[in-house]
Image (cartoon, rainbow, N blue to C red):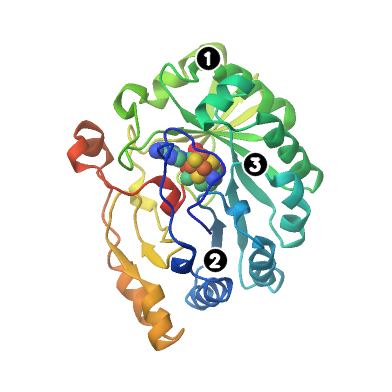
Amino acid sequence: MTDRCNFRCHYCMPEKQKFLPHGDLLDYREISDIASRFIDHGIRKIRLTGGEPLVRRDIEILIRALGQHVHSGRLEELTLTTNGSRLAQFAPILAESGIRRINVSMDSLDPARFAKITRGGKIDSVLSGIEAAKSADISVRINMVAMKNGNEDDLLLMAQYCAENGHDLALIETMPLGSGVDGRTDEFIALDEFIAPIKDLNDFSSLNHRTSGPARYWQVEPLGLRLGLITPMSKNFCDDCNRLRLTTEGKVFMCLGSNLNVDFRAAIRNEGIGAVDRLLQKALRLKPERHDFEKQMENADLRLDRHMNATGG
Ligand code: SAM
Ligand code: SF4
């Protein structure tokens, strides 16, 4: 939806991040037309992300337009990944647009630590956003990026908070995307190690539950928590990934770990929306067998220059 964001999570982007000029962005009509054409081709699930999707001006216009496909039954699911800071305002609009579940990123419940990780984010706005989503009958999964010596001791509290409030919790290993980001290697921790403290106190049983993403789910008892583990680094999940990502400047990337992409914006502006049919086939052929984050973590020279806010998580 946008590469811009009102937070600056230190693992996502540098403090002084350059954003795309507004003129480079797809407008809402273009996004809506591309989405519609994708749906014609069999895409059944769309996730809105960014950057922070809810900071783009008048985003409700696009959300409502995409929601029409859910209401008409053409689209199985419309969902959103957000930092939650503007959810209190948007939750009712999301619900009206057929959004039934969302992911909200929150790496710590401690206000000072949260502000430090996000470089200035206010946790109260996120917590009240989550409450608003709950009141609008939208189920919430909290996304928590695991950081060595960063938020390891927040895990138990976060797990308890999620269990008590009926949210799923997904833990994410950091991926080495983008330049100018400090502490990539020092901060990395494999999830097996990150969850050890709660594993000692609870039983984990594997669940068949799957969403459309890479998380593998576990039931954690007696905590009463459904826990998702997203392990791009320690346990590769590329085999069954069928995602494609349309960036705000109209490029389709088939993998977070590859710079190969197809430029839809130029083609639809020159040839009209029909160009999508041809370009989608071209993009699908670019899907790599797997990403190479392990090598990119070890060797900074191999890292892609693109930050996570350009493609969404
Ligand atoms: N702004 C929204 C948010 O924070 O939820 C949506 C975009 S954000 C890029 C999507 C997800 O990617 C978030 O859960 C975030 O924590 C995660 N993320 C960002 N940079 C990451 C990185 N280098 N490695 C792993 N996850 C990352
Ligand atoms: Fe913004 Fe999300 Fe990146 Fe944090 S992770 S800086 S909230 S886009």
Q: Earlier in the sequence, mark 2 or mark 1?
A: 2
Which amino acid lies under the numbered mark 3 shown in the image of this protein? Gly
Q: Nearer the viewer, residue 273 or 166?
A: 273
Marks 3 and 1, Cα distance to the nearest angstrom?
Answer: 22 Å
Does the image show residue 278?
Answer: yes
Q: Nearer the viewer, residue 276 or 266?
A: 266
Q: Nearer the viewer, mark 2 or mark 3?
A: 3
Alpha-carbon neighbours of circle 3 within 10 Å: few (<14), some, or many (≥20)? many
Q: Are marks 3 and 1 in contact (CB under 8 Å)?
A: no
Query: Image check: 21 left or right of 303?
Result: right
Mark 2 and mark 3 lie on one chain; the one further toward the N terminus is 2
Q: Which residue is mark 1?
A: 153
Q: Which residue is mark 3?
A: 84
User: What's the amino acid at mark 2?
Assistant: Arg
Query: Where residue 136 appears, x then y in whole percent?
Result: 79, 48
Label 1 sits on a secondary structure element that is helix
Up-down: is 162 above or below 78? above
- Marks 2 and 1, how far apart in space? 38 Å
Label 3 element class: loop
Horizontal relation, residue 39 to residue 87: left or right? left
Q: Which mark is residue 44?
A: 2
Residue depth check, mark 3 versus mark 1: number of the one nearer the observer: 3
- Tell me where residue 280 sits by quadrant: bottom left
Element class at badge 2? loop
16 lies above or below 260: above
| Distance (Cα) linking label 2 and label 3 | 25 Å
Q: The residue under label 1 is which amino acid type?
A: Asp
Q: Residues within 10 Å of mark 1 (few under 14, many from 20)?
A: some
Residue 208 at least partly seen: no
Where is residue 40 drawn, in percent x and y? 52, 78
In which quadrant of the rendered view does residue 185 lie?
top left
View extreme (right): residue: 135
